[in-house]
Amino acid sequence: MLKPGTDYTVEVNPRIPERLARLRELADNLWYSWDRPSRTLFARLHPGLWDAVGHNPKAFLKRVDEDRLNEAAEDHIFLGSYKRVLSAYDTYHGEPLRLQMPIGLKPGDLVAYFCAEFGFHESFPIYSGGLGILAGDHCKAAADMRLPFVAVGLLYRQGYFSQRIDNDGNQVATYTDSDFEDLPIDPAQRADGSEIHVHVEMPGRLVAVKVWQAKVGLNKLYLLDTDLPENSPEDRYITHQLYGGDKQTRIQQEIVLGVGGIRALEALGIKPTTYHINEGHAAFLVLERTRALVSDGLPFRAALEAVAASTVFTTHTPVPAGHDHFAEDMIWSYFAACCNELNISREEFLGLGGAGHGNDFNMTKLALHGSRHHNGVSRIHGDVSSRICGDIWPQVTPDESPMDYITNGVHVASFLAQEWQDLFDTKLGYEWRRRYCDPEFFVKVETIPDHEFWAVHQGLKAQMLHALRSRVTQQHLRNHGSMAHLDRMLKHANPLDPNVLVIGFARRFATYKRATLLFENMDWLRAITGDANRPVLFVFAGKAHPADRPGQELIRRIHEISRLPEFEGKLLMVEGYDLGFSRRLVAGVDVWLNNPIYPLEASGTSGMKAGMNGVLNLSVTDGWWDEGYDGSNGWAIKPAPEYYDDVRRNKEDSRDLYELLQDQVIPMYYRRNELGFSPEWVRMAKRSIATLLPQFNSTRMVMEYVNKFYIPASRQARRFAENDYAAARILADWKARVRQAWGGVGIRRIDAPVKRIPFGEAMHIQVAMNLNGLKPEDVRVELLVGRASRNGKENDRKVFQLRATECHGHECQFGLDLTPELCGKLVYRIRAYPYHELLTHPFETGLMVWV
């Protein structure tokens, strides 16, 4: 029966006692996202409400009963915890520069970091997965290091979806709008208190963009929002949903991020010296920065050189199809006016994104053309990216292209369980928190008594199993399952007896991650899981993109297998994977499983989080694990060759997986001593922490960005801007002259090659180059010499420079007297490429000729 009348709602907010007034300050700084004691303060006040508001401190303070706050204000135990948290907060924010603060950054240097998503904590839902969490960790580490740093992103009213799995295993996506008053953000303001709004051009109109700010420790994150009354309903929707809408929405979001982001920084009076584009979504900032310099009178090519020299670009996408691209006509409809302001032709403009000849405008190519510092996110991914992006540097081999790599890392304070942190404080001393990147120091982990180490792991495992049971129970009962069947499902997920081997697989359900590889040979899997004396529980969690039907089919398949009688209680597909549950899983399972198709895992970070918590990785040696695995800290699945077809590759990789599980993982776990644990397992778990934590943390990662890119980019920014951008003008003119001439440049050898010489004797090498109007100083001629190897690479390779000896007309001779330092059969080659001392990377022109 319907209730008569109209329901009205009102929210009654408590008054926070003066003694606890700074709870508001704690709730309004994302420092809480990596300081667990601060979150525990809120949870202690009302655990049920804390869970109900999604662990959101700001929302919690608006809804908690005032009586609870008043009681806490008189509770000496709570006040003691409150004061300890405030002391840590004040120490963090008042601390002088740390010892790891980079040497080489100058006063006034500032890094601006652009990304389409940021994952700090589940209470701030503007992320979808790995890219956003990596960006959040980057910001946290920059704050820890006191790096001069700001971040720029989009403020989505609707973040990524909430996931439910129905009784048939179908993923059901639910979207919820955030109340911005519940988020740790405030409007960015000018000195006079007025809100900062900027505008971006869309076809036939201007779109207003509001700038919000969030505090990330001492640093700021600026977020852009088009949901404003002065905008049309369509334009208000631009920033409504994370990765929502069609191609039109995507390009509009990326215009707001790239163009609007630069204008927001300008309105804030912020003048970065380095700009970091984290994935191609923000690449339009290259156009906006270039347009501004052109409007100040700089020629387009010089302006682009100045912009590129100070820009860093990180790509995370290991397949060509994964890079954002837009049709040529769509790009032109949005950027025709910008092209006119740049004073270049349509062809030249579209060429920045590789458009023309039937190609779309590619955002990765725009980012590469507009940057001089580029990287993939692991050693393997750097090589893959060099091949994918090879047409940017057409005459340079992929192994020498300007594409570098910096392997991802994760934020230790965010993902290392508090119990491990407390144990390290006791056993290693507080110093461990300052020595994240010191492998020699972390060898001390191996001295922790085995029984204490195992007790911490088992305690975390019990917590994880408790959270797992809660989620599975809610999921099962909502789908009208019976209690009897629930007991069968959870028979091995018992927090009171956490002595079952638990293997976790949790990540985005994309097909290349092969979530169902475990089911390649069902008979073998039945044998592995059929021993009642050595039970195994597999836990699966993760979301598939709502448009990814094959990814959703993987979830349905796992759900289907979990309901087979022989796998009941041995396999669970858990809904609602988020950062909060992720922290439980990476610290609480025994083994972390990852089996992507090689080499499509750009990096991966979930295994890093697991490894630093003493969870053992069982993974294909792709992405980060190829660098992390040392034979004693987990298990490696050697990937099948790339040229195998899918069927053969899956068969080979799954065989390795089954053999490792059957012959090594399960037997080692159950070889227990009289204290109830496996000494071999504990030894390997300690080794996991000791080797992986100091290598794969975000402090190391950000330090590499600083030394490899941020310092050089800031240096180049200053250099190129001096004397009215004289260096940028010179380099742009030089490149134009080189490109015009290079088609006619040739090189030939004019000495008589010798086949054999005694050790210690020199051989003379002489080449002649047709420089086609270039000068000898415009090129560098090199000899590469090394030992021949079976794989075609040159071992012990060294590079020697040939010097110009004489010139006649367009032709110049270059020579070298070489005395080889090695004996045996040597291979040498001769090449030439354009060279200028202003180049950021010697091969950035992409031009090279060989004898």
Image (cartoon, rainbow, N blue to C red):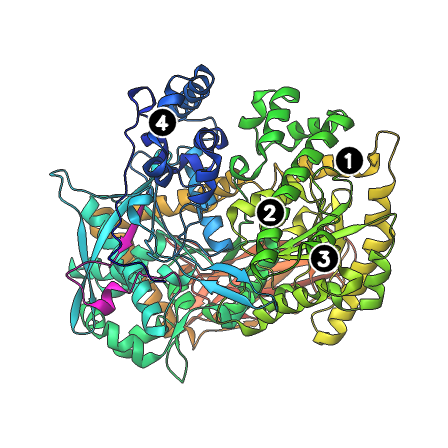
**Residues packed near mark 3 inside 10 Å, few (<14), some (14 to 19) or many (20 plus):** many
Q: Residues within 10 Å of mark 1 (few under 14, many from 20)?
A: many
Q: Main secondary structure of the magenta part?
A: loop
Q: Earlier in the sequence, mark 1 or mark 3?
A: 3
Q: Quadrant of the N terminus?
A: bottom left
Which amino acid does the dot numbered 3 rest on?
A: Leu
Q: Which residue corresponds to mark 4?
A: 67
**Residue 470 in the image: x percent, y percent?**
60, 47
Q: Residues within 10 Å of mark 4 (few under 14, many from 20)?
A: few
| Residue 105 screen position, x and y as percent | 38, 36
Identify the residue position indicated by label 1 in the image. Answer: 682
The dot on residue 571 is 3
In contact (CB < 8 Å): disc 4 and disc 3 = no
- In front here: 210 or 527? 527
Q: Are marks 4 and 2 in contact (CB under 8 Å)?
A: no
Left-right relation of 542 to 61: right
Q: Give the CA distance from mark 2 to mark 1.
A: 28 Å
Q: Nearer the viewer, residue 798 or 27?
A: 27
Q: Residue 55 placed where, x, y %?
A: 45, 41
Q: Quadrant location of residue 146? A: top left
Q: Which numbered disc, 4 or 2, marks the residue that appears first in the sequence? A: 4
**Which residue is labeled 2 in the image?**
470
Which of the two discs, 4 and 1, labels the residue nearer the N terminus?
4
Three-letter amino acid code at the position of disc 2: Ser
